[in-house]
Image (cartoon, helix red, strand yellow):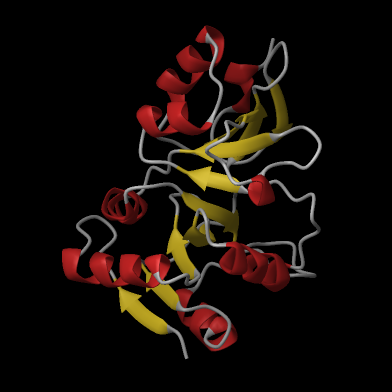
Amino acid sequence: MSQYFEIHPRTPQPRLIRRAVEILRDGGVIVYPTGTTYALGCAMGEKAAVDRIRQLRGLEERHHFTLACRDLSDIGSYTRLDNTAFRLLKAHVPGPYTFVLRATAEVPRRVQHTRRKTIGIRVPDHPVAQALLEALGEPLTTSTLLLPGETDPMTDPVDMRERLGRQVDAIIDAGPGGLEPSTVVDLSGERPEVIRRGAGDAHVFEG
């Protein structure tokens, strides 16, 4: 059975954050809040954990994973940022946006888009997610907690425990999650392109 941590959504307990990070460093898969929906996460270089997330969600090999990052300095280490992209990110992170950018060699190929060599990047606006990233010291490979055949992400941590208790290593309960995932903006081309409308204002990237 997975471990179940009830963590305060605004002032997360450091002891529980450390325990969750130990699980990540040991190659585990966790469920955690992102500020929009709950997500599945694992340490960036853990191939077996990434494969478990693929299997749990029923994802194909071409699925675009996201790296949850602490801040702009993290983003600059893992993606290629031109001046336009940097200004957009500076104005909109942390927040409910995922940005698709060209990946650097620091990003494992298994989580890049196989053909385009891009990666989704997000700086989550949630104290628990930020505490995890600060303690871990590197991005989390992450994907929305949306199970095969379902149209909405899971929102109730108690339900997650009942349904996923034997498939993940830890579930962080920080209260109910949202139903609307992040807005996804592709910044890898000549101009921004909104490829999924979700939480946040997509209009600021159009026109």
In the image, farthest residue toward the front:
105
Residue 49: x %, y % from top left: 57, 68
Dividing the picture into quadrants, the one containing residue 112 is top right
Dividing the picture into quadrants, the one containing residue 207 is top right
Residue 55: x %, y % from top left: 72, 71
Residue 190: x %, y % from top left: 72, 11
Above or below: residue 165 compared with residue 90: below
Q: Nearer the viewer, residue 76 or 33?
A: 76
Rendered residue at 43%/75% (across/down): 171
Tally the numbered discs. Answer: 0
Above or below: residue 116 compared with residue 41: above
Rendered residue at 41%/66% (across/down): 24
Q: Nearer the viewer, residue 105 or 58?
A: 105
Above or below: residue 62 compared with residue 165: above
Rendered residue at 47%/91% (across/down): 1
Rendered residue at 32%/55% (across/down): 136
In the image, farthest residue toward the bottom:
1
Above or below: residue 120 compared with residue 194: below
8 relative to 45 in the view: left or right: left
Residue 23: x %, y % from top left: 38, 72
